[in-house]
Image: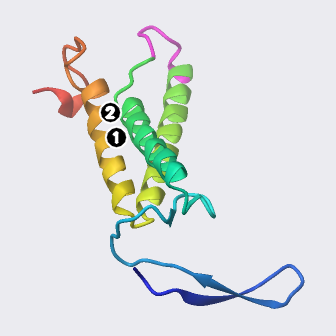
Amino acid sequence: MAEPRTVTAWNATGLHVHHKVLTHSSFYWGHTTQVLFSGWPGSNKAMYAVALIFVFSLAVLVEGFSHSDVVKPGVNRVAKVLFEGGMCGVRAGLAYLVILAVASFNGGVFIAAVLGHAVGRVLFGGRVFGKSGGSGSNKA
């Protein structure tokens, strides 16, 4: 486990505040961590499980958006471009959330993200559910 370090910061009244911060510079295993939000999941094992499920679900959604083709042929070209741009923005936002979660350096969060991407690829990018091709690199 990494050693706590003291961080000095200014608070709203202009006074120095000293906080002990636990930081990691390499992967570690354990349920006491902070993922995406300050104090979450903390040291609660049930909330850690919720955090892993959340990261897993985000990674599956990223793959879903990566392999989605919801715009039908014949739609107004401007509307299509704007909608696809919005979808790309949502996908990028979700992907960055997964990246930030992995930046917690928690091994469980890392595994949840990798498994989420793999499951999402099978669900949305593979030929398991009758897809006959796909976009670009999905063709075998």
Mark 2: give few (<14), some (14-19) or many (20+) Cα within 10 Å. Answer: many
Label 1 environment density (alpha carbons within 10 Å; few <14, some 14–19, many ≥20)? many
x then y, percent, for residue 137 = 19, 34
Q: Residue 139 lies in what quarter of the image?
A: top left
User: In this view of the protein, which residue sits in the foreground, 56 or 138?
Assistant: 56
As drawn, is 51 to the left or to the right of 40?
Answer: left
Figure quadrant of the N terminus:
bottom left
The part of the chain drawn in magenta is 71-78
Contact flag, marks 1 and 2 (Cβ < 8 Å): yes
What numbered label is drawn on residue 116? 1
Tell me the quarter of the image containing the C terminus: top left
- Spot occupied by residue 21 in the image (x, y as percentages of width and height): 58, 81
- Identify the residue shown where x is 31% and y is 25%: 124
x 33%, y 61%: residue: 107
**Label of residue 120 in the image:** 2
Q: What residue is at 39 percent from the left and 30 percent from the top?
A: 64
At mark 1, the secondary structure is: helix
User: In what element is the residue under mark 2?
Assistant: helix
Instruction: Please determine whether, in this image, residue 127 is positioned above or below residue 59.
Output: above
Cα separation between marks 1 and 2: 6 Å
Is 25 drawn above or below residue 86 in the view shown? Answer: below
- Tell me: residue 127, above or below residue 14: above
